[in-house]
């Protein structure tokens, strides 16, 4: 029976519903069983009103003591229910006359919803409800699962379909985890685990299910994590079988560059350069991620790696996420490489047609061995002569398609790929999201760096901050003043930055204040940044465009307004713009009046540590893997039941288990991947 016939055999499934199920990636009865609940509602007990708390969700039951249409900004129906312990309000902003009539005084009503503070005390907005004819009307005896759904499919419809599949017991579930593993972890069988997940009985430990730590959830989480891990390993193995050019590490140009530098590499940089050199000397594509905290010297590592390829006459491309960063890389590469006889070209959106045509000619002829740019590098009009290495800076800023497009610019076998990030990725996350990559860490800062001191200050103390900035300017220091995003509204952020610029220009006179933001023309932005770097501007007011890569060694103070609006890793990136010279540096986090207690605790993490990995781990716990990893991994990390944070203790075992499956049960690899993942082959080599 085809997948289509398979679902059509279920009661209530016709052509229209089938189409909607396909939108949810449900193509068979087995897919339905693996369309797992993302959370549960507990409707198995009635909550006494005396014990209700804000944000609590559950069932309440009581007698109607009040029902009235209220008139204010919005017309609403307010109903008050009482039980023997207290009362709660039900509020409806959309209601009919028929509904209004149901809430007669004395009627017994049972409802489900989330408790919120309201105008009349605790209220439930638009609860699901029923008017009871009998006080002893039975409650649900199972938890109520909530499923991911799409337009036109209700929760109830999914529940009924899943129930049919479970009751029919026609779907054959193949056990793909070895019996020894199930025994070792005391895990239930696949069939039992799915039954509990979809149809949790009251006798099951409700709290364990609600918290995601029930053995049935653990059983499925292990299998899902394993499928993701095996998928990445499989694609890694495929990539390693493909051909790339091998570049022996002759070290001639590397030695020349190192001897010209006024400093030595750190031990960590030396180690990572050696790891990359080994990868490049093999005739299969390198796929390596280099993590390095702010200021750890990743750019120099990238240049030394590029020289190994350039020495053999091939081209290297480096892609940066912003024009400011691309220009900075171009200037650094030109300064370091042109004395070695290596021609550098660059491509960004702001170039004139003449400049662009000249750059394109240098790239296609092979005259330019090092090419730096933004997303302009992977446009169709850009043709390389013999690209062999692609370096992606701040990899999480680019979409998968963009990195794939650059990689496909190579003509002589597969392009080696080196990705770099200054956003440290917690080990637990890297183990899951980057099983297809070799990872290197530059875990050491160059000597002479002074730790940045971070202070938390309330917005009310702004005049004192301005006075401190005035003093710092008089002492010849340079300062960043960052205005953060306001409610995801770029226009309002721009307005705030403009207003701050105008105010500070008056308050700090005669000291020179500059302004950069994302809406400026690239050449104007570059001009302001150049003036700041040369010391012609002392205070730079900016939006978060200066987050990545800008290097002004004399800048020693970073002020961030409303830092509670940003993730910790982004704050750490911004803070890393100072402390790049030898003078003592400061970061002032000027939080708003409405910052919550949790928000203040988050900011305390910034005050307590400069360790990017510790900050990234906290960011992961607070904001989840999608925010920390960015575009590529967000798609790969949308688990059905596993949770990277909750299940991080399982990840080392997943690695061992994957190796065991590959060695002893290779026939189970494809079925496991197919069961849990959609097709990811296209993006596996990026």
Image (spheres, rainbow, N blue to C red):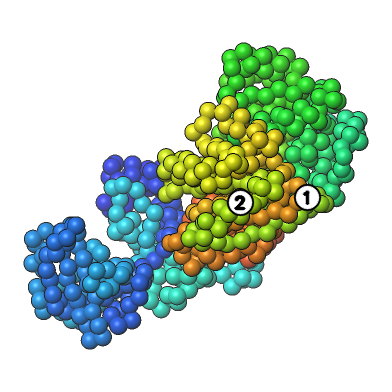
Q: Is residue 537 left or right of 103 when viewed as pictured? A: right
Q: Quadrant of residue 246?
A: top right
Q: What residue do we see at 91% from left, 36% from top?
A: 259
Q: What residue do we see at 61% from left, 51% from top?
A: 469
Residue most toward the bottom?
Answer: 84
Q: What residue do we see at 13% from left, 75% from top?
A: 66
Label 1: element kind: loop
Q: In the rendered image of this protein, does residue 197 appear above or below residue 153? A: below
Q: Which of marks 1 and 2 is nearer the N terminus?
A: 2
**Residue that label 2 marks:** 469
**Residue that label 1 marks:** 582
Cα separation, mark 1 vs mark 2, equals: 19 Å
Give the percent coordinates (x, y) of residue 646: 56, 65
Query: Where, quadrant-wise, is the N terminus in this rendering?
Result: top left
Q: In which quarter of the image is residue 301?
A: top right
Label 2: element kind: helix
Give the percent coordinates (x, y) of residue 122: 28, 73
Relative depth, front residue between 455 and 369: 455
């Amino acid at each position: 029976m085809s997948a289509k016939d398979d679902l059509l055999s279920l009661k209530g499934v016709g052509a229209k519903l089938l189409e909607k199920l396909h939108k949810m990636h449900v193509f068979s009865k087995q897919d339905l069983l693996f369309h797992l609940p993302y959370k549960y509602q507990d409707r198995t007990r009635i909550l006494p009103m005396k014990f209700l708390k804000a944000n609590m969700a559950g069932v309440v039951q009581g007698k109607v003591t009040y029902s009235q249409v209220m008139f204010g900004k919005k017309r609403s129906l307010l109903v008050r229910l009482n039980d023997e312990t207290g009362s709660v309000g039900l509020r409806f902003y959309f209601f009919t006359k028929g509904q209004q009539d149901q809430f007669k005084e004395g009627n017994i009503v049972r409802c489900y919803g989330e408790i919120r503070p309201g105008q009349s005390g605790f209220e439930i907005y638009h609860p699901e409800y029923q008017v009871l004819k009998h006080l002893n009307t039975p409650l649900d005896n199972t938890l109520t699962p909530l499923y991911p759904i799409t337009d036109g499919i209700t929760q109830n419809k999914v529940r009924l379909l899943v129930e049919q599949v479970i009751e029919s017991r026609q779907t054959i579930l193949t056990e793909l985890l070895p019996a020894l593993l199930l025994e070792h972890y005391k895990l239930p069988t696949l069939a039992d685990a799915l039954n509990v997940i979809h149809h949790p009985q009251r006798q099951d430990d409700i709290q364990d299910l609600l918290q995601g730590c029930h053995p049935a959830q653990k059983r499925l989480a292990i299998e899902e994590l394993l499928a993701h891990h095996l998928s990445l390993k499989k694609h890694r193995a495929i990539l390693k079988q493909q051909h790339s050019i091998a570049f022996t590490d002759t070290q001639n140009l590397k030695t020349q560059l190192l001897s010209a530098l006024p400093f030595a590499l750190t031990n960590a940089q030396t180690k990572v350069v050696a790891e990359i050199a080994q990868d490049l000397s093999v005739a299969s594509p390198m796929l390596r991620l280099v993590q390095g905290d702010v200021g750890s010297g990743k750019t120099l590592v990238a240049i030394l790696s590029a020289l190994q390829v350039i020495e053999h006459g091939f081209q290297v491309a480096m892609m940066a996420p912003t024009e400011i960063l691309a220009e900075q890389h171009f200037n650094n590469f030109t300064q370091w490489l042109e004395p070695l006889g290596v021609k550098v070209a660059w491509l960004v959106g702001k170039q004139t047609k003449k400049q662009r045509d000249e750059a394109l000619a240098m790239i296609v002829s092979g005259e330019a061995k090092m090419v730096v740019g933004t997303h302009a590098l992977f446009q169709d009009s850009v043709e390389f002569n013999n690209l062999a290495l692609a370096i992606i800076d701040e990899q999480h800023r680019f979409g998968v398609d963009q990195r794939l497009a650059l990689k496909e610019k190579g003509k002589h076998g597969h392009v080696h790929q080196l990705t770099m990030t200054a956003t440290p990725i917690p080990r637990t996350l890297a183990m899951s999201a980057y099983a297809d990559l070799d990872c290197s860490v530059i875990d050491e800062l160059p000597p002479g760096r002074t730790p940045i001191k971070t202070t938390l200050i309330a917005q009310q103390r702004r005049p004192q901050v301005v006075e401190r900035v005035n003093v710092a300017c008089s002492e010849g220091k340079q300062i960043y003043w960052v205005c953060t995003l306001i409610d995801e509204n770029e226009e309002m952020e721009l307005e705030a930055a403009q207003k701050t610029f105008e105010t500070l220009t008056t308050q700090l006179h005669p000291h020179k204040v500059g302004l950069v933001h994302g809406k400026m023309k690239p050449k104007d932005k570059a001009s302001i940044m150049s003036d700041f770097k040369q010391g012609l501007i002392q205070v730079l007011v900016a939006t978060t465009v200066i987050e990545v890569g800008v290097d002004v060694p004399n800048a020693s103070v970073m002020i961030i307004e409303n830092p509670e609006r940003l993730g910790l890793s982004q704050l750490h990136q911004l803070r890393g713009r100072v402390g790049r010279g030898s003078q003592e540096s400061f970061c002032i986090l000027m939080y708003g009046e409405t910052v919550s207690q949790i928000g203040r605790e988050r900011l305390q993490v910034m005050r307590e540590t400069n360790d990017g990995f510790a900050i990234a781990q906290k960011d992961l716990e607070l904001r989840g893997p999608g925010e920390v990893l960015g575009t590529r991994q967000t798609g790969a990390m949308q688990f059905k039941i596993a949770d990277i944070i909750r299940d991080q203790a399982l990840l080392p075992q997943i690695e061992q288990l994957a190796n065991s499956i590959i060695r002893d049960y290779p026939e189970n690899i494809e079925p496991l991947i197919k069961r849990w993942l959609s097709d990811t082959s296209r993006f596996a080599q990026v």
